[in-house]
Image (spheres, rainbow, N blue to C red):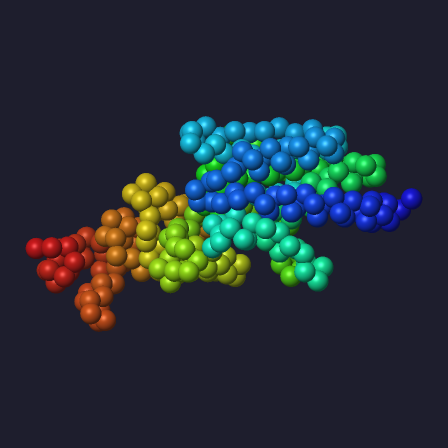
């Protein structure tokens, strides 16, 4: 039998099971912050994995005594080469308890986490189960990675799994079934891998104007790198960064200069950054150029001392 046809038939058979499982997850108020009802949610996922005959591993994160964090890993198939399905079971806080009562209207499932992303967690578990049930031949294995704490940065979820070497282990691709209006978005590793940290500022969705969107800043970095540039403009790259983070960024910029011959034009208010990175400095004050020169010349300029460095 054609594998696609077999999977379609099996999916039709288990459609009601997927819906019921999704509804059970939605009823659990796993709000984050602060991390409520994680144990109950993880137990429900474990029960479904056991019912479907999928072996699993529970990874509890140390340091969360009041509200433990649980992550689940499950694999089907042989070999190390792994295609991962990655999802999370925490949801942002609800405005009312009614949001944890699932309902179906005109063929659509509604409720807190229905889209982001409890129904997706149910779907990816059943995807692995149906592949196993239909005995679809694999060149490797399918992995399920179900985590906590996605809504607050992943410290008790993906971040910890990465720290202990379990996040994406032996993976060649990952599917995250977040809703995209039915569009599949592709993200790929290129010939060169760069590790870049872009800092943002947390803010509630209703007060987003008070925050800094790190994703938007990362897009600017990505656009610049895609053009194979000779020069990069960085506008306050260390804004909001700690002392240690600032030092790491400075080291990274120096490496790019040496290894790739990039020129940087940096707008920055931290004197330590400017004095240690720049060969030539242009000093602005009240919208006008105050002076220019080498770091040593700028440090000794009386106007600069008065305006920025202090008498």
Q: Residue at x 42, y 29 (%)?
A: 65
Q: Position of 65 compared to 290: left or right?
A: right
Give residue 217's quadrant in the image.
Answer: bottom left
Q: How many marks?
A: 0
Q: Position of 137 compared to 76: left or right?
A: right
As rendered, which of 150 and 263 lies closer to the eye?
A: 150
Q: With respect to residue 289, does 146 lie above or below?
A: above
Q: Residue 158's x, y, as percent?
A: 52, 39
Q: Residue 242's x, y, as percent?
A: 31, 44
Q: Is residue 75 visible?
A: no
Question: Residue pushed farthest right?
Answer: 1
Q: Residue at x 61, y 43 (%)?
A: 25
Q: Residue at x 53, y 44 (%)?
A: 29
As rendered, which of 45 and 209 lies closer to the eye?
A: 45
Q: If the image is split into quadrants, where does the N terminus sit?
A: top right
Q: Residue 67's x, y, as percent?
A: 45, 34
Give residue 3's quadrant in the image.
Answer: top right
As rendered, which of 122 and 23 lies closer to the eye?
A: 23
Q: With respect to residue 175, does 145 lie above or below?
A: above
Q: Position of 215 compared to 283: left or right?
A: right
Give residue 184's quadrant in the image.
Answer: bottom right
Q: Residue 98's x, y, as percent?
A: 54, 53
Q: Residue at x 47, y 45 (%)?
A: 32
Q: If the image is split into quadrants, where does the C terminus sit?
A: bottom left
Question: Residue pushed farthest bottom?
Answer: 288
Q: Position of 182 compared to 234: left or right?
A: right
């Amino acid at each position: 039998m054609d594998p696609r046809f077999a999977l379609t038939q099996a999916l039709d058979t288990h459609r009601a099971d997927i819906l019921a499982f999704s509804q059970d997850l939605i009823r659990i108020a796993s709000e984050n912050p602060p991390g409520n009802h994680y144990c109950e949610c993880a137990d429900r996922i474990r029960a479904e994995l056991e019912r479907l005959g999928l072996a699993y591993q529970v990874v509890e994160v140390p340091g969360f005594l009041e509200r433990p964090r649980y992550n689940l890993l499950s694999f089907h198939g042989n070999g190390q080469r792994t295609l991962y399905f990655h999802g999370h079971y925490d949801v942002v806080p609800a405005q009312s308890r009614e949001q944890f009562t699932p309902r179906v209207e005109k063929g659509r499932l509604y409720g807190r986490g229905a889209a982001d992303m409890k129904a997706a967690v149910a779907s990816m578990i059943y995807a692995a189960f149906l592949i196993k049930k239909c005995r679809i031949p694999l060149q490797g294995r399918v992995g399920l990675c179900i985590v906590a704490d996605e809504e607050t940065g992943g410290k008790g979820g993906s971040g910890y799994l990465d720290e202990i070497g379990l996040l994406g282990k032996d993976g060649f691709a990952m599917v995250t079934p977040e809703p995209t209006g039915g569009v599949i978005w592709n993200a790929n590793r290129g010939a060169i891998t760069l590790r870049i940290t872009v800092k943002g500022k947390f803010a509630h969705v209703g007060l987003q104007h008070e925050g800094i969107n790190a994703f938007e800043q990362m897009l600017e970095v990505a656009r610049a790198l895609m053009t194979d540039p000779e020069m990069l403009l960085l506008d306050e790259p260390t804004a909001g960064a700690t002392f240690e983070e600032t030092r790491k960024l400075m080291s990274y910029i120096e490496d790019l200069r040496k290894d790739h011959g990039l020129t940087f034009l940096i707008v920055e208010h931290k004197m330590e950054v400017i004095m240690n990175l720049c060969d030539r400095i242009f000093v602005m004050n009240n919208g006008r150029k105050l002076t220019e020169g080498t770091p040593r010349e700028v440090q000794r300029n009386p106007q600069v001392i008065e305006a920025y460095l202090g008498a």
